[in-house]
Amino acid sequence: MKPAVVGVKIHSGWGILVAVSGSVDSLEIVERRRIVITDLTLPRANQPYHHSATLGLPEAKQHLARCATVSERLSSAAISDTIGALAKRDYRVVGAAVLLASGRPLPSLPEILGAHPLIHTAEGEFFRCVVGKAFDGLKVPVTGIRERDLARFAEAVLGDAAGPLQRAIAGSGSSLGPPWTNDHKMAALAAAIVLNKL
């Protein structure tokens, strides 16, 4: 089986997943999906911290725990389905790259719920953490790469090949067809970096 790495760019309740295989000189985009990792029957499941801010602290903790459990299950199912689909096409997922935000540690839950900017930060971290746990549960090694460091990390790992690879990924949309957004391109580049490191 050919090795493949999955790159993921997460938003609130959903994400873009791109799997790559091959080499830096001939990278293949072997899968791309939009995954949904929330159950919309839960109150404001796409914004669990926003909803929690309207609750008392014990209820907020319960709501966040319930949302995390459901989102971990949905993430695991979506990733497992992707791994299975790739295996049927003779690809073996050997790693994952999850794009991260700034990576600053979050304060306590009461402090988060008391500051709207922190609520947004916490929600992003919440969903990235859920996806990371899903990969861990499926025994797929995960590498986190901060978005703002992606190009610099590519240059550090790939050297002179980083620029041509980024241009090749950007141009892949013409052969793949839509959608091929900036999220797809970042996820593909992150996955290519991890694949090259293995």
Image (cartoon, grey):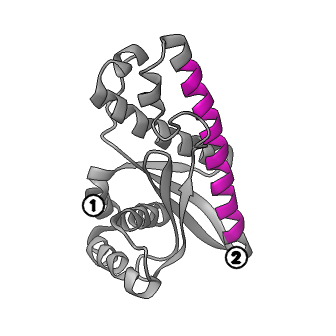
Residue underneath mark 2: 90
Between the residue at mark 1 and the residue at mark 2, the CA separation in whole angstroms equals: 30 Å
The part of the chain drawn in magenta is 61-85
Residue ranking furthest to the bottom? 175
Q: Label 1: how many residues lie within 10 Å, few (<14), some (14-19) or many (20+)?
A: some
**Residue 151 marker:** 1
Horizontally, residue 133 falls left or right of residue 148, namely right
Horizontally, residue 82 falls left or right of residue 147, namely right
Which of the 4 image quadrants contains residue 31? bottom right
Q: Which is more toward the observer, 189 or 171?
A: 171
> Which residue is painted at 32% across and 62% down in the image?
154
Against 12, residue 52 (above or below) is above
> Which residue is painted at 49% across and 65% down in the image?
195
Q: Does the magenta portion include 64? A: yes
Against 164, residue 72 (above or below) is above
Residue type highlighted by circle 1:
Ala
Q: Label 2: how many residues lie within 10 Å, few (<14), some (14-19) or many (20+)?
A: few
Horizontally, residue 99 falls left or right of residue 1, namely left
Picture coordinates of residue 107, whole percent (x, y): 36, 20
